[in-house]
Image: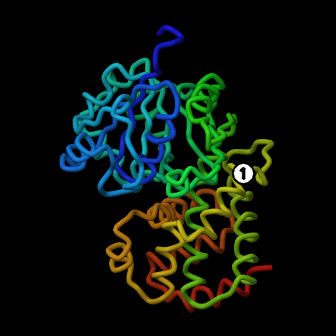
Amino acid sequence: MKPHEPTRLTVVGGGSWATALVKIFSENNVSIRWWLRQQADADHIRKYHHNPSYLSDVQINPRKVRVCTSIRDAFRNSDYIVLAVPAAFIADALTGARSKDFEGKHVVSAIKGMIPERNQLVTDWVEEVYGVPAERICVIAGPCHAEEVALEKQSYLTIASSGPDCAGTVAQLLTCRFVQASPLDDIYGVEYSAVMKNIVALACGITHGLGYGDNFQAVLVSNAMQEIRRFVDTIYPKLRDLSASAYLGDLLVTAYSPFSRNRTFGSLIGRGYSVQSAQMEMNMIAEGYYAVKSIHEFNQQYQVPMPIIEAVYNILYEKVSPGAAMNRLKMLLK
């Protein structure tokens, strides 16, 4: 590819984060194929240049973005495949795609979740199922809500990969007027932290729904950071600074922000909603709901003490009442 030619990207997903990423990438010299599941949404974007279902105020640049509903058509001639659908539905979204379709491409996971049933990180799943080399895979992390991207609020992203060239290039593609992106080599630490911060946000939402105050939530979040440290240091020992924005920053914004769907989901559970009712009320996916089961099961082989994670798991999957679970948890926090 000549230096002046646009970088060819495919974005997979039609939700708010996928829409935000299309907006960010469009700030740079790119050519985007945007895959959406719903034909009606694709037709609407072609005609009106905005997503009717998510972040509808974001204007889609028709000179840079081509929408489609065929996954193999979306992959054709692209250099980077950006995955931005919930982890629980990524296999379904990629139905029809073959290992050959990934050959020579880089894969960028913008998914902060794990593959249910397999209890596997998305990056590991892509490497195993589609044969993409690890050095060609990276993840997008950091405290960056899609809603604030739509408003062009200053935001920060971290691109983590075992391949420095992959992380550095994707960071450049995501850096624009209102986003600063930087590379990092701690892909597993970043990815597991991103998965776990969604579970912590659920816990914060549950306590909020139960009527706990800011004092308790501050203690909850600080203890949660210790749980994350114990877990990632056990499964992937590495010198890392967990106070960096890719770790602590992402945790804080997800735990406290009204834009956090995991916090919102947890708040509904704390107020007495069933899981099914809360999911229907939100009409969006809270990754933490699926992630807590995966982390709970994955941790059976490591036995890392994680009382906050276990409390959320017991509430959502063992049907322990939120009040009883949090009464037990509060005695364990310091």
In the image: residue 98, left or right of residue 88: left
Residue placed under numbered mark 1 in the picture:
245
Say if residue 117 shows up in the picture. Answer: no
Say if residue 107 shows up in the picture. Answer: yes
In the image, is residue 154 above or below residue 327?
above
Residue occupying the point 60% across, 51% down: 192
- SS class of the residue under badge 1? helix
Residue occupying the point 36% across, 45% down: 13
State the image quarter where residue 36 is shown: top left
Q: Amino acid at mark 1?
A: Ser
Q: How is the image coloured?
A: rainbow
Residue occupying the point 38% across, 72% down: 282
The residue lying toward the viewer, choosing from 137 and 261, is 261
In the image: residue 184, left or right of residue 135: right
Q: How many marks?
A: 1
Image coords of residue 330 (percent x, y): 70, 86
State the image quarter where residue 280 is shown: bottom left
State the image quarter where residue 327 is shown: bottom right
In the image, is residue 208 above or below residue 111?
below
In the image: residue 267, left or right of residue 179: left
The residue lying toward the viewer, choosing from 289 and 181, is 181
Image coords of residue 163 (percent x, y): 62, 26
In the image, is residue 89 above or below residue 216?
above
Quarter of the image for the C terminus: give it: bottom right
Assess disc 1: are there few (<14), some (14-19) or many (≥20) residues with their C-alpha within 10 Å of its C-alpha: some
Image coords of residue 109 (percent x, y): 49, 40
In the image: residue 181, left or right of residue 57: right
The residue lying toward the viewer, choosing from 249 and 19, is 19
Q: Residue furthest top?
A: 2
Image coords of residue 187 (percent x, y): 63, 39
